[in-house]
Amino acid sequence: MLALAAILLVLAVGFGVRSTFILSLAGYTCAFALFALSINLMLGGLGEVPLGQCIFFGVGAYGTAMLTIEAGLPFVAAVPVAMAASAVLAVGIGWLTLRLTGAYFSIVSWGLAGVMMVAAMNLEVTGGPLGLFGFPSLTVGPVDLTDPQSYFFFTAAVLLVVLAFLARVRSSRFGHAIESIRQSRHLAQSVGINVFRERLKMLVLSAPVAALAGALCLPYTQIVTPEVFSVVLTVDALLAVLIGGTGLLFGPVIGTAIFTILPQFLKLDPNVKVLVFSLAIILVMMLAPGGLHQIGRSMLARLKRGEGGR
């Protein structure tokens, strides 16, 4: 039912909305929701705050840009290569960071993101501070991703496929092992689960999803700069995850939609946006730590109790 509702919503937006601006923004929202999902794999799955997740987003964006501009690869071939590169990088980063937990893991991953940002600003191959732009072609077969409607339909389709894949992962043996680790690392270890290996697998799984998000944001931004390695980008996606809720697979998608689309409709100044969402996060964390997911479940429970009392 949820999948059918999601498909109908995509069709309604794609064919019902005429504004190219809204369609482009909706496409970008779908792409950025992938980044939020990658963060939720670490936050909701392992209970870790991956401040350095922007590393993989940046590798996806820069990798795709460099392969299309310098190597002349088509977009559809460049994206999988960038995703594979992010997975390989995740293995190395995982060996360095995943023996740490909590604030230590977050701080070290943040530091690595800073290293990547400095490197991107000073390397000629990344375009230095100005970044890379002027992509030769952003197409997938006959689909032109610079067309707002095509861009929205494509990113929405990719998002739905990734959601379906992650739903299967969550219900798999690996998903159950991750849930055990999240609840109690020591208990999981006592029943024979290799905690470090499973945590590493989760990081390696999350990296290509973040890289895919970075690549799919290119048709919207038309440029990639060192700021993609800024931890601010991770915090934006983290806020979206917290607003939507970590317990629901669709939570980060809902949170991203609120975080990206609502300020545009309300025409919020960037500084006001930061204030509004900061206050919203404080209220959500105080009243409903599970995000909108928890609020929705509470409302449904009250409705059921009300019907039962009649």
Image (tube, grey):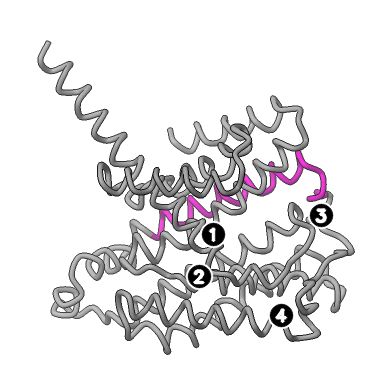
- Expressed as whole percent of the image width and height from the top left, the position of residue 235 reads 48, 61
Sequence-wise, the earlier of marks 4 and 3 is 4
Kind of residue indicated by mark 1: Phe
The residue that label 3 is drawn on is 141
Q: Is mark 1 in CB contact (under 8 Å) with mark 4?
A: no
Q: Could you tell whether 213 is left or right of 75 in the image?
A: left
Residue sitting farthest toward the left? 309
In this picture, is 222 found above or below 50? above
**Three-letter amino acid code of the residue under disc 2:** Gln
Secondary structure under tag 4 reads: helix
Asked whether the beta carbons under mark 2 and mark 4 sit within 8 Å of each other, the answer is no
Q: Amino acid at mark 3?
A: Gly
The magenta-colored residue range is 143-169
Pointer 2: what residue? Answer: 53
Choose the circle earlier in sequence order: 1 or 4: 1
Between disc 3 and disc 2, the foreground one is: 2
Mark 2 or 4, which is nearer the eye? 4
Amino acid type of disc 4?
Answer: Met
Instruction: Classify mark 4: residues with Cα within 10 Å, few (<14), some (14-19) or many (20+).
Output: some
Quadrant of the drawing holding the N terminus: top left
Q: Are marks 4 and 3 in contact (CB under 8 Å)?
A: no
